[in-house]
Image (cartoon, rainbow, N blue to C red):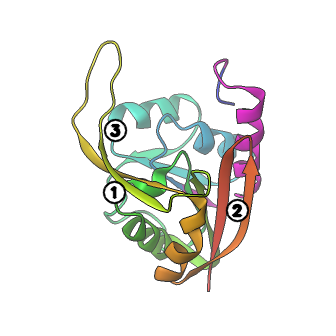
Amino acid sequence: MGGTASSKQDRRADEQILLACPGPTIDLGCGPGRFTAELASRDTPALGVDMSAMAVEMTLRRGGVAIQEDIFMPLPHSGRWQQVLLADGNIGIGGDPVRVLRRARELLAPHGVVVAEMDAPGFGVRHEIVRCETAQAVGDWFPWARVSASAAVDLANAVGLRVVNIVEVAQRNIVEMATT
């Protein structure tokens, strides 16, 4: 799924994330759309959301459905998604994981689940200023938070969610948080 650059372990972790999303899923910060498109190929309704026009285009080319939008702006089917996906550490968007989880909870249907990929347990939450760099371009600085799985319970409780499952696959921590 991740292409030729992904390892067998990464593909196992990606599969675990996909298994945690059996119903209609909104993928916040979908990037190039690997999860959004794969869910669609499995006949699971999925919508990717990303600020980047290029990311949305890549998702569409992969066969997924995506919109270019800020995750904190009004989004389709708010309050009706069975899963909200925060893969690849996207719980850290904007440097405020509580705000991201609060937004995710707003998007969930009753009995819905947030599926968030977090760092290994041990450090809580780290606030950073980061930027994307390639050999061809250097992006602007932006706030980000790295969130360890050991912070999951406190963060979930802060927004009215509860941790129902934490699975470590290939050194990636997949945390499921359900509405209370």
Q: What whole-number distance in Å separates the C-alpha atoms at marks 1 and 3?
A: 18 Å
Q: Residue at x 52, y 44 (%)?
A: 65
User: In the image, which disc is placed on residue 60?
Assistant: none
Q: Is residue 149 magenta?
A: no
What is the x, y in percent for residue 82? Answer: 63, 68
Q: Is residue 15 magenta?
A: yes
Judge left or right: residue 31 versus residue 171: left
Magenta highlight range: 4-26
Q: Residue at x 52, y 84 (%)?
A: 160
Characterize the local packing of mark 1: few (<14), some (14-19) or many (20 or more) Cα atoms within 10 angstroms: many
**Disc with the residue nearer the chain's start (1 vs 3):** 3
Amino acid marked by disc 2: Gly
Where does label 3 land, which residue?
52
Reply above or below: 26 against 110: above
Where does label 2 land, which residue?
23
Residue occupying the far left of the picture: 140
Which quadrant: the N terminus?
A: top right
Q: What whole-number distance in Å separates the C-alpha atoms at marks 2 and 1?
A: 28 Å
